[in-house]
Amino acid sequence: MTRPVQRNRQRPPGILLTLGLVGVLFFALPFVGLLRRVPWSNLVDVVSSEVVVDALVLSLVSSTMAALVCVVLGVPLAWLLARIDFPGRNVVRALVTLPMVLPPVVGGAALLFAFGRRGTFGGPIFDATTFVLPFSFWGVVVANVFVAMPFLIVTVEGALRGLDQRYEDAAASLGVSPLGVFWRVTLPMIGPSLGAGLVLAWARSLGEFGATVTFAGNLQGRTQTLPLAVFVELQRDRDSAVAISLLMVVVSLIVLVALRDRWWRR
Amino acid sequence: MSGLIADIGVRIDDFALDVAVSVDVGETVALLGPNGAGKSTTVRSLTGAIALERGRIELAGRELDAPTTPTFVPPHERRIGVAFQDALLFPHLDVAGNVAFGLERRRRGEADMWLERVGLAGFGSRRVSELSGGEARRVAIARALASDPHLLILDEPFAGLDAGARVELRRLLASQLPDLELPILFITHDAAEARTLADHLVVLESGKVTQRGAPSDVQRRPTSRYIADLLGTNLLTGSADAGVVRLDTEDIRDVEGGALELTIADRTVAGPVRLTFAPHAVSLHGSQPGGSPRNVWQARVGDLHDLVGLVRVHLDAPVPIVVDVTPGAIADLAIQPGSTVWVAVKATAFDVVSGS
């Protein structure tokens, strides 16, 4: 097959070109503003301060764990939504995607009322085990999962619906059990979408603010993640806030670039 | 080990499927029918994608589906290997990985052996996306066979292949199928393929079996115009009396414009009859042929269709029949769509069967 001749390519319509460029600027300008305020001279000192290092470690660990929990719970849930025609399926789908549109702070409050020390479920759990979920590291993970899992579910369910189920029928005809088919055919075939869902969930967790601060609080070294640290530092030490912001931009860019070849292309 | 004994009754929305088919070990049965006849539904019922509403499926002495007992063996325990129409090779595995998919411990050595049998030795580590259509079909057949099935279903194995790949695959199947000690069900809409590969034909139309038998019998005595068309032969129905058949359609006109009666060799048969005659038993003429007492009428040419070395002429009026003639005759008689020719059929050319 020969390539079409280059001069046949049409110029994009001016209005689309203009608006598209405005869109690019909309994303680029805030970063220009951020970069202009970076305290380059003492950047290393600020970034290596105890507050920032604590927040960075906490953010990376909690968002990674949250993303893994999202996969473990979200993939089976997406499979049920895509493949099993049960009564109330649409209600369940609306429920599990609600956090995508709900203000995160409302989600955090709901979590608190349910799993707080005096909450509907948290109370009995505390009485039985003295375990308190909110204002702990696990509280951060739970808040992250709550807001991030819908992204994974939506992505994976879409991929499962798009998968030609005859591949699964073919696998079954070769004597492989339904669970084996899921592992050996369904999961590998939706791999790119699963990866994309995982990255989305991880990114959403990394940037999570409202639900975390409401449900897990803002305790340095225990529940203060990078976004919370940025917010605190903005009121205290602007240089520090800018440095942490730059750190988040760098971490996010590294992940996006590292995964680009694996999942965005093809 | 015994073969497949299936009596399938299912209903999907407005479509009712009612088909009985049995395949012995070492036998190839073709399920032949047009799109929408119920071939796919038959396959899905056999593999367990659809549960029977009525009937029974037994394979190798084991009951697979019987609503009355009520047995239902899930698809992965049925041991029915299917070479699917679109091959459906798993894109995330290489060729050997596909063939070994149903093998215990997924032994690649065994996969290589099966690849060799389908003429694809050395293809094991290729990517599925690198295969041609014909190669993909052969891998699908190897994959189905490697899982050690009790029944092999070939689902439209030639559909969508180019002529060369088609010939190659047909040759492979013709040489390999008899050696497999398996019942083989061959699903197709192509009568020529069914005839070459199958020991037995089952013709399916609108969810019902309309004819079954050895390919030569079905070919010689099709029971419906559809089957005759499918097999590329001619069928006319009428009523016989003392060697003369008045056609049911009554719209064959003789030269004077009266209803044409066809003369047959057998003078004893009476009542409703089916007349079958081969496309090559008909001759075409530019003017009214004289001489011996033959069946002669004037016909309009509908369409021409190239065969290898011959041209199939579809005559659409007064009755639709097909005639095979040489390209030279086409030129001599100036045959083209819409032109008029004289048709002559000898009385002895008709195969006459009583019954409607």
Image (cartoon, coloured by chain):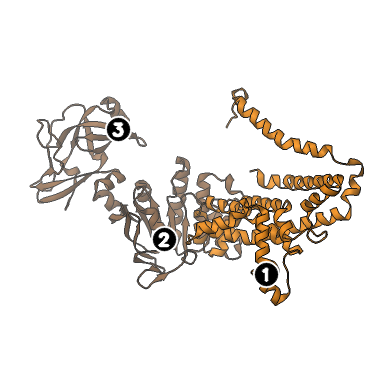
Chain colours: A orange, B brown
- Real-space Cα separation, disc 3 to disc 1, in angstroms: 81 Å
- Residue shown at 26%/40% (left/top)? B279
Labels 3 and 2: the sequence-earlier one:
2
Q: Quadrant of residue B49?
A: bottom left
**Residue marked by disc 1:** A122
**Residue marked by disc 3:** B303
- Report whether A121 appears left or right of B90: right
Q: Position of residue A17 (x, y in %)?
A: 64, 28
- Residue shown at 38%/72% (left/top)? B70
- Real-space Cα separation, disc 2 to disc 1, in angstroms: 47 Å
Task: Estimate how packed mark 3 is, as few (under 14), some (14 to 19) or many (20 or more) residues with alpha carbons within 10 Å.
Answer: some
**Is the residue A3 above or below the residue A262 in the image?**
above
Q: Secondary structure at mark 1?
A: helix
Return the chain for callout 2. B
- Residue shown at 41%/57% (left/top)? B43
Q: Amino acid at mark 2?
A: Ile
Return the chain for callout 1. A
User: Looking at the image, is mark 3 or mark 2 nearer the viewer?
Assistant: 2
**Is the residue B237 above or below the residue B63 in the image?**
above
**Residue marked by disc 2:** B50
The foreground one among B43 and B95 is: B43
Confirm whether residue B111 shows in the render.
no
**The C terminus of chain A sits in image quarter:** top right
Q: Position of residue B17 (x, y in %)?
A: 33, 57
Task: Estimate how packed mark 1 is, as few (under 14), some (14 to 19) or many (20 or more) residues with alpha carbons within 10 Å.
Answer: many
Q: Amino acid at mark 1?
A: Gly
